[in-house]
Amino acid sequence: MHRLFEECEDVPLEYDRDGHGGADQRMGDARYGPPRQGDPLGRRATHHDGTLSLLTGFAANRSFETGEPVRVVDVPDLS
């Protein structure tokens, strides 16, 4: 890990040989299991965060297609 303006440091990672290095189980636990205690960095995404991420991707794709800027609020086209 390399924090801004700090020395680089090694961070040990847990690795499991099961599906995707153990990520499948951890993602399932995070989504469907009991809430984990503590999120020291406050980075747990919500359904709202996921929605914004998808809309941003859709806006980017539409921008690539048209060559024009696209506002995220203009992306939903439910017709």
Image: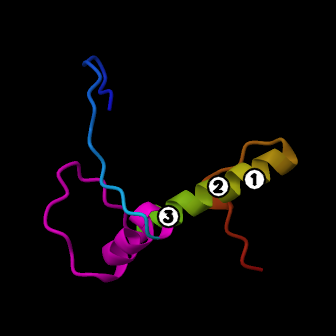
Residue, far left: 37
* First to last magenta residue range: 19-47
Residue under pointer 3 = 20
Distance of mark 1 from mark 2, alpha carbons? Answer: 6 Å
| 45 in relation to 13, above or below | below
Q: Is residue 66 left or right of residue 33?
A: right
Residue 24: horizontal and vertical position, in percent?
44, 71
Residue at left offset 68%, top offset 62% = 75
Q: Nearer the viewer, mark 3 or mark 1?
A: 3
Residue, far right: 66
Distance of mark 3 from mark 1, alpha carbons? Answer: 28 Å
Mark 3 vs 2, N-terminal side: 3
Which SS class for mark 2?
A: helix
Instruction: Give the quadrant of residue 3.
Output: top left
Q: Nearer the viewer, mark 3 or mark 2?
A: 3
Residue under pointer 2 = 57
| 78 in relation to 19, above or below | below
Badge 2: few (under 14), some or many (20 or more) residues near its Cα, within 10 Å? some
Q: Is residue 48 left or right of residue 76?
A: left
In depth, the one of 45 and 36 nearer the eye is 36
Residue type indicated by callout 2: Gly
Quadrant of the snapshot with the N terminus: top left
Residue at left offset 40%, top offset 66% = 22
Residue under pointer 1 = 61
Residue 78: horizontal and vertical position, in percent?
72, 78
Q: Is residue 37 left or right of residue 68?
A: left
Which SS class for mark 3?
A: helix
Badge 1: few (under 14), some or many (20 or more) residues near its Cα, within 10 Å? few
Quadrant of the snapshot with the C terminus: bottom right
